[in-house]
Image: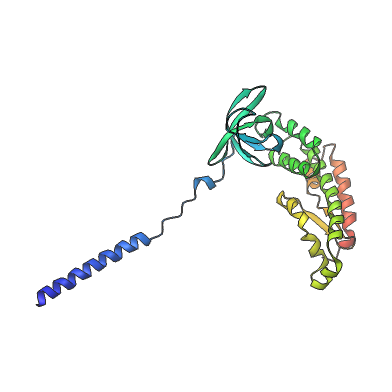
Amino acid sequence: MKRPLLLILLYVFVVFTLVAEAQKRRAAPKPFKKPLALAPARESSNTAVVVDERLAVLRSAPSLFAPSIQRMRTGHLVSILGFRDVDGVTFCRVNAASNNSGWVQSDALFSKFKRGDDERLSRLVQASDGFEQVERAGVFLDLYNESPLRPAILLLLGDLMEDAALKLSSDATKKLDRREMAASGAPLHSFYLNYVSLDRYRKIGAIFVFNPTAKLFHYDGASWREIVAKFPKSSEAPEAQKRLDALKAKMETTKGEN
């Protein structure tokens, strides 16, 4: 009786051990591998940026009559695979995302590697208006670090931002209720600097400072400072310095209040 009982116990032990090991193997976490689709795209001479959304329709074929896949937004990076001329329009075959490719009108795209694209984008920026002009100027500055047109776009962007600051100041003062702000106990300037309409400017890296005495936003002057520091001999440098001096005067009353 003892031998069969020992054999049974041994058998149960072996089976239990094998099952436990199998469960460990199944439960062991696999090393994390970042999906290729999420890996940052490597910039190359085939890389381009969407700027003109009016023309940035990704299509299934190189034709203005082909079904659309999506409309791409300003700042969208694509990889150009080829070109085709159809009905007087040049189309680019592009990879727009890991699982999305198609054809888009070449005029919607700009590349830092294509000669003359900085001039083309500069003209588009000058002809634009509203927040779209600010966005396009920002794309220009991201793409063309060495362009001779950079100082002019920097000066323009600074002026656009200061104009926007004045409008934002007026809008914020109208919409922020003084009694509500006082009741909350939070500092006045924090309401202004958290004002919702600043969000889209923050997304493109624009920064505003705030004068709590005058209750006015002002552009922080980053583009003007770049002109003075990097392009001191440009025709835009004296104008940029004037704007920086004016900004300093506007912000004098904030000393000791932050």
Question: Disc count in the image?
Answer: 0
Q: Nearer the viewer, residue 67 or 77?
A: 67
Q: Is residue 7 above or below residue 85?
A: below
Task: Evaluate whether residue 83 shows in this view.
Answer: yes
Residue 214 sits in quarter: bottom right
| Image quarter (top left, top right, bottom left or bottom right) of the N terminus | bottom left
In the displayed structure, does residue 12 sit left or right of residue 44?
A: left
Q: Nearer the viewer, residue 87 or 188?
A: 87
| Image quarter (top left, top right, bottom left or bottom right) of the C terminus | bottom right
Please state the horizontal and vertical placement of residue 132, each as a whole percent of the image.
76, 42
Please state the horizontal and vertical placement of residue 90, each as a whole percent of the image.
65, 26
Please state the horizontal and vertical placement of residue 244, each as a whole percent of the image.
86, 49
Residue 138 sits in quarter: top right
Please state the horizontal and vertical placement of residue 201, each as a whole percent of the image.
75, 51
What kind of colouring is applied to the model shown? rainbow
In the displayed structure, does residue 256 sit left or right of residue 80?
A: right
In the displayed structure, does residue 28 sit left or right of residue 254?
A: left
Q: Is residue 88 above or below residue 11?
A: above
- In percent of the image, x 83 and y 49: which residue is there? 164
Task: Evaluate whether residue 45 shows in this view.
Answer: no
Residue 15 sits in quarter: bottom left
- In percent of the image, x 74 and y 31: which residue is there? 120
- In percent of the image, x 79 and y 64: which residue is there? 190
Q: Nearer the viewer, residue 133 or 72?
A: 72
- In percent of the image, x 81 and y 50: which residue is there? 221
In the displayed structure, does residue 33 sit left or right of residue 92?
A: left
